[in-house]
Amino acid sequence: MTIWFDETFEGTRFGLKVTRTLYGAQSPYQRIDIFETEAMGRVMTLDDAFMTSERDEALYHELLVHPAMLGAASPRRVLVIGGGDGGTVREVLRHPCVEACVMIELDELVVRACQTHLPTIGTAWDDPRLDVRFADGIDYVKTSDEPPYDVILLDGTDPVGPGAVLFEHDFFAACKRMLVEGGVLALQSETPILLREAFLETQKKLSALFGAVAPYFGAVPLYPSGLWSWTFCSDTRDPLAPDGARAEALEPSLRWYNRDVHRAAFAQPSELRRALAAMHAR
Ligand code: SPD
């Protein structure tokens, strides 16, 4: 019997043929499943939404991390909120200038399940610079009195249900509070095709807080519509000026990101450019 797993999202349905079920559990926060698929390798879903796959995770994680890391000036302290599969911290820790990477993940069970069943994604769990904490990232940025960070990366779920708070103005303002002057915040900012309004609203909220807010785009075949966005935010750093020497040293170890991909990602398709201009005017 052929088993398919389908994610339904905003009037679409994307399915993968499952060859083996590896893990399934209900945590205090969400349903977690990991399975093997014919097309995308091992895949994790949270509450029946695709989160990551071995086949295309680099397209997502490298684009979330490297524009911010190469846009900031030699980042030493990095904060990751979410990112329980370990792909984001793996990319952060490729940068030799990083001295400390704090990862705040709400759901310990996600990390434990990924450590066991997605070892090709989380390859940096043992890095001594990594400090993984199981806590609420929103509380942390609102209340922490720890030193600020050079880069903050938000690797959360979709802005529906419990994930919606990760796209609110107060949360973004609290993240800014935890950034050094001239620091960079980068986040996954959803599909500009199926969640156009949420994408635009996110840009608007961020633009009220940061001098430079630049959305950028790339393909993530696992995610609804296949076209994904991330957003680079800073008061002083130029998203189009990644550190060339550090990028050159990094590129041979990466699957997807390079400086040409970086430039192309920040190009705004006409329809989105018009929508962003209209959003800024209203
Ligand atoms: N629609 C899925 C959006 C998920 C974004 N975060 C994925 C986490 C991968 N580390």
Image (tube, rainbow, N blue to C red):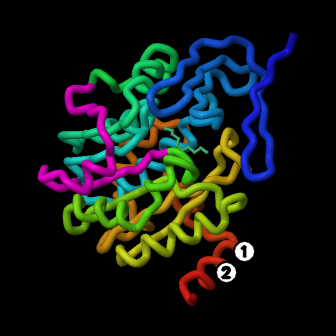
Task: Confirm or reject: label 2 Cβ below 8 Å from ligand 1.
Answer: no
Disc number placed over residue 64 in the picture, else none: none
Q: Quadrant of the C terminus?
A: bottom right
Residue situated furthest right in the rendering: 1
In this rendered view, identify the residue nearer to me: 58 or 155.
155
Q: Residues within 10 Å of mark 2 (few under 14, many from 20)?
A: few
Q: Which residue occupies 39% across, 60% down?
A: 242
Q: Where 14 sits versus 74, above or below?
A: above
Q: Is residue 78 left or right of residue 202?
A: left
* Residue 152 belongs to the span the image colors magenta: yes
- Left or right placement of residue 109 versus residue 183 in this view: right
Residue 124 on the magenta span: no
Q: Which residue is mark 2?
A: 274
Q: What is the tally of numbered marks visible in this picture?
A: 2
Q: Which image quarter has ligand 1? A: top right
- Residue nearest the observer in this picture, 5 or 119: 5
Whether residue 111 is situated above or below residue 216 in the rendered picture: above
Q: Nearer the viewer, residue 262 or 196?
A: 196
Q: Position of residue 16 (x, y in %)?
A: 76, 28
- Residue type at mark 2 is Arg
Percent x, y for residue 271? 72, 74
Determine the residue positioned at 22% across, 58% down: 178
Identify the disc placed on residue 271.
Answer: 1
Residue 211, horizontal then vertical, whole percent = 36, 78
Q: Given contact means CB atoms under 8 Å apart, are the residues at marks 1 and 2 in contact?
A: yes
Q: CA distance from mark 1 to mark 2?
A: 5 Å
Query: What span is colored magenta in the figure?
Result: 127-156
Residue 264 in which image quadrant:
bottom right
Q: Amino acid at mark 1?
A: Glu
